[in-house]
Image (spheres, helix red, strand yellow):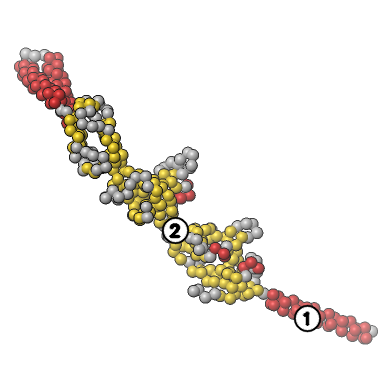
């Protein structure tokens, strides 16, 4: 009986040492299989994103001057392509009949004024009824209105530049007879000049009024400001119209030129990574692999800007980080949650 107990004890001891040996082997194997990945320490930076949009220059004002009276052109003192100051007389419509009309209305006004004064005096003395007084007052006021209209017509024979502008086109010549409403000249104001651009619904949310902008027009750069943002989108393109204003004192920028506009957006915190470090998880989400607490972790990202040699990225949700250890080598063979060793690159 003792022999059997001894044999059974030896068997148990043998099994115990064998299992312990296997556990040690497994632990050794796990240690041996722990991977080493190369990582790089990235520090959060302030990044100013730039919105780049295309458009065309446009004159701030384009006006067709029209005749407000009938008559013959008796004087023309402007040429196409030249700039004239506001208030400069560029055309005269023969005023002779307007002068005569004004004198006639002035004489009638004086007569009606005297009649009204007499009627008022007689009314005060009780020799004229209130109806007669009212009639005299009406005649006087009608004569005054006719006189003022005659003055306006005489003044309208002089065609003046309404603002500093360039004469783009002329529609009359000396001796032409004009009717009321006939076009005289086309004038354009190029200072300031506008750039009209279209923005998508995503871009429009980043633009505000009076925001600074840079424009490249015919290989020259100009500074401007956003002076208009439409509140409704185009029903076909779903884009929003934006207008940038640029000072153009020497009228060197012409209307209709292709333009590239750059608008700086508000600065935000971001990390810059090489495009080769982008990964996809099993669900097809875009992200990067980092090492955190000695384990591989997949972080989904949002790309803020593609600058050609890499991406400026941020993290979704409330994931705020000041620095990360991004895997630069070995990420293809490491999985989320895996325990790894790290070899840190030098930040050159």
Q: Circle 1 is placed at which residue position?
A: 21
Describe residue 117's horizontal placement relative to residue 72 as left or right: left
What secondary structure is marked by label 2? Answer: loop
Q: Residue furthest front?
A: 174
Residue drawn at 63 percent across, 73 percent down: 340
The foreground one among 113 and 69 is 69
The foreground one among 61 and 110 is 61
The location of residue 140, given as percent across then percent down, is: 13, 21
Q: Is residue 118 above or below residue 299?
A: above
**Snapshot quadrant of residue 7:** bottom right
Q: Is residue 89 above or below residue 37?
A: above
Residue drawn at 87 percent across, 84 percent down: 10
**Snapshot quadrant of residue 36:** bottom right
The location of residue 137, given as percent across then percent down, is: 13, 20
The numbered dot on residue 109 is none
**Snapshot quadrant of residue 17:** bottom right
- Using a 10 Å C-alpha cutoff, classify the residue at mark 2 as few (fewer than 14 neighbours), some (14 to 19) or many (20 or more): some
The numbered dot on residue 49 is 2
């Amino acid at each position: 009986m003792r022999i059997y107990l001894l044999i059974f004890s030896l068997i148990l001891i043998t099994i115990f040492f064998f299992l312990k040996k296997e556990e040690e082997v497994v632990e050794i194997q796990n240690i041996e299989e722990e991977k080493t990945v190369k990582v790089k320490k990235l520090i959060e930076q302030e990044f100013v994103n730039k919105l780049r949009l295309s458009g065309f220059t446009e004159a701030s004002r384009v006006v067709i001057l029209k005749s407000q009276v009938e008559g013959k052109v008796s004087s023309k003192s402007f040429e196409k392509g030249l700039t004239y100051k506001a208030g400069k007389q560029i055309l005269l419509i023969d005023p002779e009949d307007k002068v005569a009309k004004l004198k006639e209305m002035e004489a009638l006004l004086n007569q009606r004024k005297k009649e009204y004064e007499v009627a008022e005096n007689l009314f005060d003395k009780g020799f004229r009824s209130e109806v007669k007084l009212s009639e005299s007052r009406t005649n006087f006021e009608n004569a005054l209105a006719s006189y003022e209209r005659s003055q306006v017509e005489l003044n309208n024979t002089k065609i003046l530049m309404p603002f500093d502008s360039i004469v783009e086109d002329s529609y009359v010549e000396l001796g032409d007879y004009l009717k009321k409403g006939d076009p005289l000249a086309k004038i354009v104001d190029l200072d300031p000049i506008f750039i009209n651009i279209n923005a998508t619904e995503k871009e429009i949310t980043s633009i505000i009024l009076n925001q600074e902008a840079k424009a490249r027009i015919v290989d020259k750069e100009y500074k401007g400001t956003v002076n208009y943002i439409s509140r409704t989108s185009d029903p076909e393109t779903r884009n929003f119209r934006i207008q940038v204003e640029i000072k153009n004192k020497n009228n060197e920028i012409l209307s209709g030129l292709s333009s590239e506009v750059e608008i700086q957006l508000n600065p935000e915190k971001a990390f810059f990574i090489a495009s080769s470090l982008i990964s996809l998880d099993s669900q097809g989400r875009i992200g990067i692999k980092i090492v955190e607490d000695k384990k591989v972790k997949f972080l989904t990202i949002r790309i803020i800007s593609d600058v050609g040699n890499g991406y400026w990225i941020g993290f979704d949700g409330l994931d705020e980080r000041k620095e990360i250890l991004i895997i630069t080598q070995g990420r293809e063979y490491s999985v989320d949650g895996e325990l790894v060793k790290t070899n840190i690159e030098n930040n050159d």
